[in-house]
Image (spheres, rainbow, N blue to C red):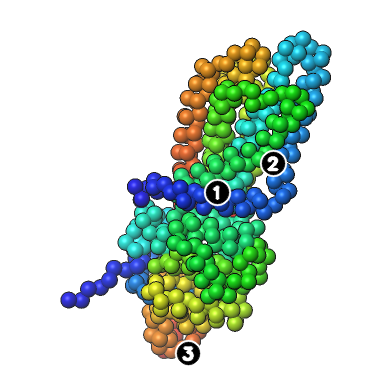
Amino acid sequence: MDVTPAPAIAVDNLVKRYKTATAVDGISFQLAPGTVTGLLGGNGAGKTTTIAMIMGLVSPTAGTVAVLGAEMPRQRYRVLHRMNFESPYVNMPMRLTVRQNLSVFAQLYAVADEAARIARLAADLDLTEFLDRPAGKLSAGQKTRVSLAKSLLNKPDVLLLDEPTASLDPDTADWVRTHLERYRAETGATILLASHNMNEVERLCERVIIMKKGRVEDDDTPARLLARYSRETLEEVFLDVARGRDRQREVTG
Amino acid sequence: MNDAGLEFSLNRVAAMVRRYWYLLISSWPRLLDLVYWPAVQMLMWGFLQTYVSSNSGYFANAAGVFIGAVLLWDILFRGQLGFSISFLEEMWARNFGNLMMSPLRPAEFISALMIMSLVRLAIGMVPVTLLAIAFFGFNLWSMGLALVAFFINLILTSWAIGIFVAGLLLRNGMGAESMAWTIMFLFLPLTCVYYPVAVLPHWLQYVAWSLPPTYVFEGMRALLIDHVFRFDLMLEAFAFNVVLFAGAVFAFLKLLDSARTQGSLLQGAD
């Protein structure tokens, strides 16, 4: 008997309307446990609002979001301890040291053996020498790694990443990606990644959801997307979707 | 229980208190600021009282009434400010996304802010009460149980106002920041900190008597001038405080819901 595991994230006909704009316009998708999915789209496509609704930070106007079986935001406290997120647009308190910041969040997430977990993450993310430095005195790349360390403190089953390598140099970005790959391999976590970096998406994601004007424009594996659009890279696919060339290609092709 | 966020964890409250404590001790000017203004205010009113009482029989009999008023006013004002500043620290740090995405419940967050309000108040007020003894021979602590009743009522009001302002900040972002600094000054004339309620126009007295701190300041004058502890006033103040506190928590939860609908939790500092 074929038993399909319950989706880690289930988004069903999700809508978010603000006073003057519709940010998300009836999207649906399901993410299987243990998968890494890329959420692509230009600025204003609705990626951040979608992630915010999955996290329970924004209430949907219509439709539903369920994470690990809990409806968000109504049942968020059932699952928040099993989730985490990282975004360069949400800061850690600047006057606290890295160790103090991580300690506070470790306690909020009831992490067992807080000191050992922080030491391990600091070693993994090359933060050991910065642990006692105020977060405000770190470089952008170091801050991103601290934020990533915070997002992994509770070993989340669902990890939401909003442009995790923005503002990182290529070497550090590559290093972060390697760490994420290792984390997923070790824990079987489900990762949803919003990114503008197509190389990153091609490398990390086994599935790509492309959004445009609040809707899902396409949803498939990177390989099938490349084949369907007859392109060599996801960046070309992204540009085709963003500029509406898919339809043009179909017409002329 | 979990779904409504009613489960309460002392461990998470401790985590937030720890966070605010780290912040507090990371900056000595901020620590100094806790004592600076209360001390300046107390000294100014203390010297004024000394001058006035030497020229007026009434005030000579009401020793310490100004100093007592300024110290109790500071409990009310600094209590709310201590609550609101800890809350504002999260807005300034753009840390709300991290906190709201964590398992921290609203009740735990509010509890941590109340504890920090007490900590900040203790750091600021204890030295100033000692200065009042040294400079003017006015011992606030000698009020004993009356001081406990005054304190409970004042701190409850300050927390209720702090909770309401926190809700406004969540809903409206930093546009509402000035409320945190100024809202309590509306209470200064209306709660009759430095004069009896009878001084107000008749119609305004109804407004004054609907505010819990008014009962405390009237009670303080009764204690210092008539040497009578008005338990009835404290009980009435407490009843109003229960209503005010419940209303503030209700408003906070509604404003938090509204912030979720408006999408303002991620853009807390905007």
Q: Are marks 1 and 2 in contact (CB under 8 Å)?
A: no
Q: Is residue A135 above or below residue B141?
A: below
Choose between A77 and B46: the one closer to the eye. B46
**Residue positioned most to the top:** B57
Instruction: Mark 2: give few (<14), some (14-19) or many (20+) Cα within 10 Å.
Output: some
Choose between A66 and B54: the one closer to the eye. B54
Determine which quarter of the picture holds residue B202. top right
> Residue B53's spot in the image, x, y percent?
78, 16
Residue located at (45% from left, 64% from top) = A154
Q: Looking at numbered disc 1 in the image, what kind of residue is underneath it? A: Val
Where is the C terminus of chain A found, in terms of image quarters?
bottom left
Q: Is residue B253 above or below residue A121?
A: above
Tag 3, which chain?
A: A
What residue is shown with label 1? B17
**Disc on the earlier residue, 1 or 2:** 1
- What is the secondary structure assignment of the residue under circle 3? loop
> Residue B230's spot in the image, x, y percent?
56, 16
- What is the secondary structure assignment of the residue under circle 2? helix
Which of the two marks, 3 or 2, is nearer to us in this view? 2
What residue is shown with label 3? A232
> Residue A173's spot in the image, x, y percent?
56, 78
What residue is shown with label 2? B34
Q: Quick check: do tags 3 and 1 share a chain? A: no
From the viewer's perspective, tell me whether residue B47 is left or right of residue B107: right
